Image (spheres, coloured by chain):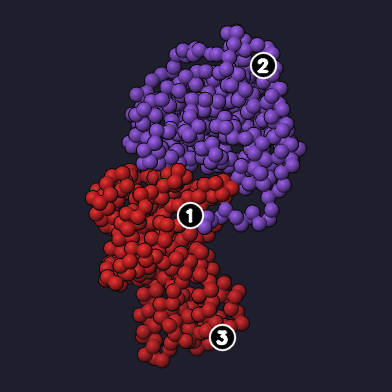
Amino acid sequence: MAQAKTTILSPRLDAVLARRLLGQMALIRRFEEKAAEMYALGKIGGFLHLYIGQEAVAVGATSTLRPDDYAVSSYREHGHCLAKGSDPRRVMAELFGRRDGLSKGKGGSMHLFDKSVNFLGGHGIVGAHLPLAAGAGFAINYQGGDQVVLCFFGDGAVHEGEFHEAMNLVALWKLPVIYICENNRYAMGTAIHRALAQTEIWRFAETYGIHGEAVDGMDVLAVRECVGRVVERARRDKTPALIEARTYRFRGHSMRDPAGAVYRTREEVEREKQRDPIALLTARGLKDGVLSEADVRAIEQNVADAVDEAVAFAEASPEPPASFLFTDVYKD
Amino acid sequence: MAVMTYREALNLALREEMRRDPRVFVMGEEVGLYEGAYRVTQGLLKEFGEKRVVDTPICESGFTGVGVGAAMLGLRPVLEMMTFNFAILALDQIVNTAAKMLYMSGGQYNIPLVVRGPGGPAAQLAAQHSQSMETYFYHVPGLKVVRPSTPADAKGLLKSAIRDENPVIFIESETLYAVKGEVPDDPDFTIPLGQAIVRREGTDVTVVAYMGMMYRAMEVAEELAREGMSVEIVDPRTLRPMDTQTIVSSVRKTHRAVVIEAGAGFAGMGSEILSFITEQAFDDLDAPVERVTGENAPMPYARNLELLKTPSKAKIAAAIRKVCNA
């Protein structure tokens, strides 16, 4: 049943785990900072929704999964795709609209898919992928598997009917799906109190009789602990859950709203940046003595190299040939 | 050959495909315990159990999304829309998700999904339950759209739809469920999607029509035969992909064409069929192609008005005479 905000148990952090979590968060951060640069240079077009500030949610949550588990997300999904294990080079090539992109350049930033790591996609219609996650859970049960599905979405999806349809279905049918609402307090430019009658999102779980919990989405270890518990439970007895990860997006809604300054104050943004999830983990690791300054510098260098390599790969990849316009419309 | 109703033919197709492939399951409102609002899924729960015959809450968008997600993991869902009018609630899942998944994923995730149920003009069901729904789907690349007119077609095309690797919109009709016809017994009998059929051979004019309009056109053709007119009737059966070749070949033979559709005419199926006939066979035509369509109004409830809404035999006959006398 639903419960209030978790007491953070300060899970044990060892050197291997600290390097892994920090490495993934830093990779996502660096990848997106570079993507923003490439957008400004006109190398990336269309919509580009950055995840900067929210990295602890994707990394903490997916760190509890087995490779054969599934993840699915919205259009703000670069972080989830990378955290699930996709090759940054192919993700960048997709953003560039090149043939070696995950979707051959046909999907773009909002539609990353990677079957090789069971990443079921980036979906562009708010709320529409929540029933898809339920369908993946249905198929797992149908096939007799013990995998679980993590479904990431923003607080804006909670306004949608499909959120409630999906909650009802996973609860009714006992589907192994963990819904992770990344509450960054703004649905595009609409503050949560202007859009939701119930702003404690985890409480919707009570209505559907499933486990609900709020967690500090800036603390990767808290996310990992919370999601780890519900994932193990779902694997064991098919129990779904709704997790509200309280987080903040440091950038605007998309590159067309780069500052996100109209609907929130500069003071608020600066205050939230004090709780940068990467800085928090770094400080914790240094304090616990499981990370050294040298470790941190090495991680930064590694991810900078990986992202540079991703850009070089994307630049070198050819545009999709004209014939690709008509492939993958139907499967024979 | 066995003689059975359209409804029984659909039921048999579902049974045979579920026996053939354990990945196939049926899901929808009232498909199990209630045995289907129109009894198309009668007996399936008893034979296949709750795992494969799944009653859903009333949530068309939700359960269609479940179908799409399950298809991504390799299952082959057959979703029932109690009536296709309700599929508008699932339009986003069908159009934005199911139809585009293969493309957006660069070929990684195909969606072998069937969405089936009755649509088109019914009997005094009024505006929200009686309309031609194919219009909302055949425009969309990535979807296939089937409208089967006879029991044999219902069986053969539904089996092909279930075996297809893509999302297929399969729209039946309340008014045809009780129609009887011969259906091949062979469990491997299928009709490929995208093949039109010549229902009636003739030499003076080609009439293109499907579902209830096809039966109405057949009656008109018999009446006009007594006046010495020879009407050929072509039933497209699949609207997307459309078998343009069979239709154009018929027009090249008869040099005249009338296109009938039950739905409101503006930007309807008839417009598209008329377009490709004109594009591909203009020089063969001896008269402008005529369209006979439903009127551009919602479906009224009152019986007298309802009769005015869909193309009558008199209007069909008048259009045929017009092109033949041109």
Tell me the subunit letter for badge 3. Answer: B
* In this rendering, the label closer to the viewer, 3 or 2: 2
Residue A33 can be seen, yes or no: no
Rendered location of residue B199, percent (x, y): 40, 77
**Which amino acid, by three-letter code, is at mark 3?**
Asp
Residue at x 55% of width, y 82% of height:
B252
**Which amino acid, by three-letter code, is at mark 2?**
Val
Name the residue carrying label 2. A296
The colour one sees for chain A in the rendered image is purple
Neighbour tally class for label 3: few under 14, some 14-19, many 20 plus, Cα within 10 Å: some
Residue A215 can be seen, yes or no: yes
Q: Is residue B204 above or below residue A88?
A: below
Front residue of B177 and A11: A11
Q: Is residue A292 left or right of residue A312?
A: left
Front residue of A202 and A59: A59
Residue at x 37% of width, y 23% of height:
A2
Name the residue carrying label 3. B286
